[in-house]
Image (tube, rainbow, N blue to C red):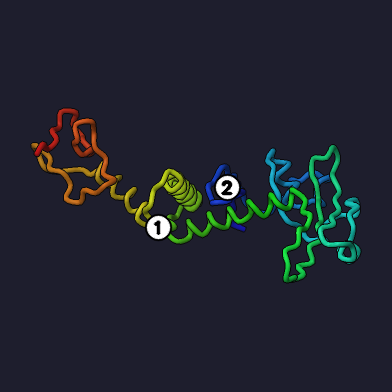
């Protein structure tokens, strides 16, 4: 079965929360089992929208069947709720008829919200899959650790782009790697250390414009041009 991640993201793919688990999920309360993924999110204290096949709904969900709803005018909808209105199932009639004029069709707000925010997890998976950590370890927890690192890096890139950054994901990832190598490079030479030959716009400096480098001794000297 392997390991999986429950994940909540924004529509752009920023991971807001995640929860690793193994095997199939069987912890849904009996009264919510007929509502599928929405019930699972509710049991974990989260809110969200998702889709569910009509044949997966239980008999207790008294909602109009599709064949009957399609006979009504476009924009009609029906819904049912679980106990205490904690979960709502909504079915909307949009027959996708192509007309040569603009037509206003009523749409439930829950459908609108789903269309606006869907696809965030898919976008996260796509961003990570392009440059996923390819190193494989023998420990069972190594894939989980590498996945978490990939998600953290992907989130950092999302924040960078929101802040106005222009570089692509691969270049951003390389900048992180170079920054780590520059900061923790161990030098076997004694005396003043010269700056890296690979300085770039994302190199880290201290308050004196000196490149931050790994030092084993507290009195090590830095190179001043």
The residue under the point 43% across, 43% down is 163
Kind of element beneath mark 1: loop
Residue 38: x and y in percent read 74, 48
Distance from the alpha carbon under mark 1 to that under mark 2: 28 Å
Residue 143: x and y in percent read 49, 53
Label 2 Cα crowd, 10 Å radius (few <14 / some 14-19 / many 20+): some
Side (left or right) of 69 relative to 220: right
- Give above or below for 25 relative to 86: below
Residue 156: x and y in percent read 43, 45
Q: Nearer the viewer, residue 187 or 138?
A: 187
Q: How many marks?
A: 2
Label 1 Cα crowd, 10 Å radius (few <14 / some 14-19 / many 20+): few
Quadrant into which the C terminus falls: top left
Check the image and name the residue furthest to the front: 101
Kindly indicate the quadrant of the structure image that contains residue 206.
Answer: top left
Residue position for label 1: 135
Regarding residue 119, the answer to whether it shows in the image is yes
- Give above or below for 217 relative to 20: above
The residue under the point 28% across, 49% down is 178
Residue 21: x and y in percent read 61, 48
- Give above or below for 180 relative to 208: below
- Give above or below for 131 relative to 19: below
């Amino acid at each position: 079965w392997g390991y999986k991640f429950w994940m909540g993201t924004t529509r752009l793919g920023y991971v807001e929360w995640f929860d690793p688990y193994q095997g199939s999920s069987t912890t849904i309360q009996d009264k919510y089992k007929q509502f599928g993924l929405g019930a699972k999110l509710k049991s974990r204290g989260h809110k969200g929208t998702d889709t569910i096949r009509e044949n997966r709904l239980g008999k207790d969900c008294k909602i109009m069947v599709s064949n009957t709803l399609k006979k009504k005018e476009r924009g009609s909808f029906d819904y049912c709720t679980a106990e205490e209105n904690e979960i709502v199932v909504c079915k909307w009639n949009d027959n996708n008829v192509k007309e040569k004029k603009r037509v206003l069709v009523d749409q439930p707000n829950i459908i609108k919200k789903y269309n606006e925010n869907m696809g965030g997890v898919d976008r996260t998976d796509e961003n990570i899959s392009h440059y996923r950590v390819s190193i494989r370890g023998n420990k069972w927890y190594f894939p989980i650790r590498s996945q978490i690192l990939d998600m953290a890096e992907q989130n950092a890139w999302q924040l960078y782009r929101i802040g106005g950054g222009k570089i692509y994901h691969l270049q951003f990832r390389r900048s992180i790697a170079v920054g780590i190598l520059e900061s923790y490079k161990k030098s076997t030479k004694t005396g003043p250390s010269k700056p890296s030959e690979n300085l770039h716009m994302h190199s880290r400096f201290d308050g004196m414009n000196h490149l931050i480098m790994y030092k084993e001794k507290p009195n090590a000297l830095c190179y001043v041009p």
